[in-house]
Image: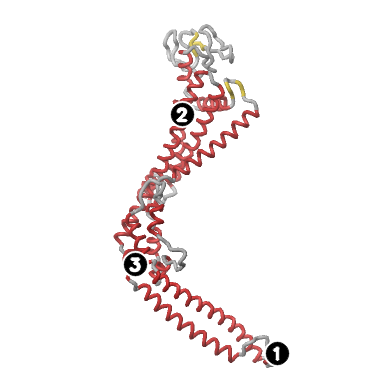
Amino acid sequence: MFTRLNNLWNQFFRRSRSINNEPLNKVSLLVIIIVDLFILINVFTGLNDISRWHLSPQQVYPCYAEWEGYQKNNSPEKDYELVQSFLSYNDNIKSNYQQSYQDQEIGHLGKVSGVCLEYASIKDKFNNGENQALLSSINTKQDNINRLESDNITIRSQYDSTVLEKIAGQSPNKSINQVKAEEAKQKLEENSQKISQIKEEIVKFKNNLLQKPSSQNLLNFVKDRSKFNDVETGYENASFWYPSIQLGFQVLFLAPLIIIALLVNNYTQSRGYGLIALISWHLLVIFFIPLIFKTFEFLQVGVIAKFIFDIISAIFGGLVFLVQYVYILLIPLVGFAIIKFLQRFVFNTKSQAAKRVQKSQCINCAKTIRIQDAHCPHCGYYQYVECHYCHELTYKKLPYCYHCGTEQTHDS
């Protein structure tokens, strides 16, 4: 196994740094590396774009986060907090929630949840001028409260200082404060009364807003547990399958590139087109890198990861850290499978050698040679090896001796 991996590694670097078995000069190698990096960046950019082609769970169910937040909110004013978040009292900015939800479908596959579209329509009807005016009044009154409370803080600081000056027997003419103690106390009481009065007015305005028919329709819709359960179930299913959908589109993006690069590389290798063979080889490697990367990424977050997590949770309960043990075992197995695939279909030297012998080409460099040539006149490679059974010379890298038909077990 280690011998095969070593041969695979050596062959990879030999093919990546040579044209017709002649090493590239440093400048040419640098140019190829720069081109490789540029293409690799564009491949990852393309993968990122195509992975977002299908609507994400958040786009299919844009109302889920709001609904979930409302269900988990334990505040006594959560109804008001919800309706407040949907109101825009700026006449120049009129939100259209339903249209914004539907716009997410443009240029993407998938449809926005019908329940969320219905929810958005109710929000649009609620976000009217009358409700905006109510919210504007509430915010204005709250600003007044904030201003009065700020004044009280300033007055209290001056009041405490004035009281200390009075206790110390300091003349009022020498005081650094503009407000006398008696006046400060009176002002504090007046401001506190105004704050209480304004708070009562705010409560009335809030109740008035919540009692509006449009508000009741919105709150009744949000409080409908059956609708929320449908959205929650749909969101969880979409989240479960979304990594698999993303990987599928990414494979769809890479597959034509890999196939074309592989076909071009095989054709140019057989024809001896060194430069094109080198470029197509580099492209093939570049296209495989993100495929391997995305495959391992999928194993961490996709359907397989969820399946493994569920099994570990069911068997061992809270010992979910055991999932990492499974990954430590699973990832090398996947890597081994990828190596076997590359060795069988991409780096298969025996299959390559058989085609070259049939075409009277050098087993090593694929240049045309005469049948009687034991060494390639182009690269000097010796074409034969001694059969371990009949001791006659037979072609290197071919599975059977062409004299006695015995299977060859050498690694040459």
Residue located farthest toward the left when viewing the structure as drawn: 226
State the image coordinates of residue 196 (x, y, percent, origin top left): 46, 83
Residue at 64% of width from left, 88% of height from top? 164
Looking at the image, is mark 1 or mark 2 earlier in the sequence?
1
Give the Cα distance between marks 3 and 2.
Answer: 57 Å
State the image coordinates of residue 335 (x, y, percent, origin top left): 46, 35
Q: Which residue is mark 3?
A: 219
Residue at 53% of width from left, 11% of height from top? 369
Nearer the observer: mark 1 or 3; the answer is 3
Q: How many marks?
A: 3
Query: Secondary structure under badge 3?
Result: helix
Q: Amino acid at mark 3?
A: Leu
Q: Quadrant of residue 246?
A: top left
**Crowdedness of circle 1 by 10 Å Cα count: few (<14), some, many (20+)?**
few
Q: Is residue 359 left or right of residue 19?
A: left
Nearer to us in this view, 337 or 16? 16
Looking at the image, is mark 3 or mark 2 earlier in the sequence?
3
Specify the label residue 174 is tagged with: 1
Looking at the image, is mark 1 or mark 3 earlier in the sequence?
1
State the image coordinates of residue 253 (x, y, percent, origin top left): 44, 37
Q: Which residue is mark 2?
A: 260
Q: Is residue 133 above or below residue 303?
A: below
Q: Is residue 357 above or below residue 181?
A: above
Query: Secondary structure under badge 1?
Result: helix
State the image coordinates of residue 197 (x, y, percent, origin top left): 45, 83
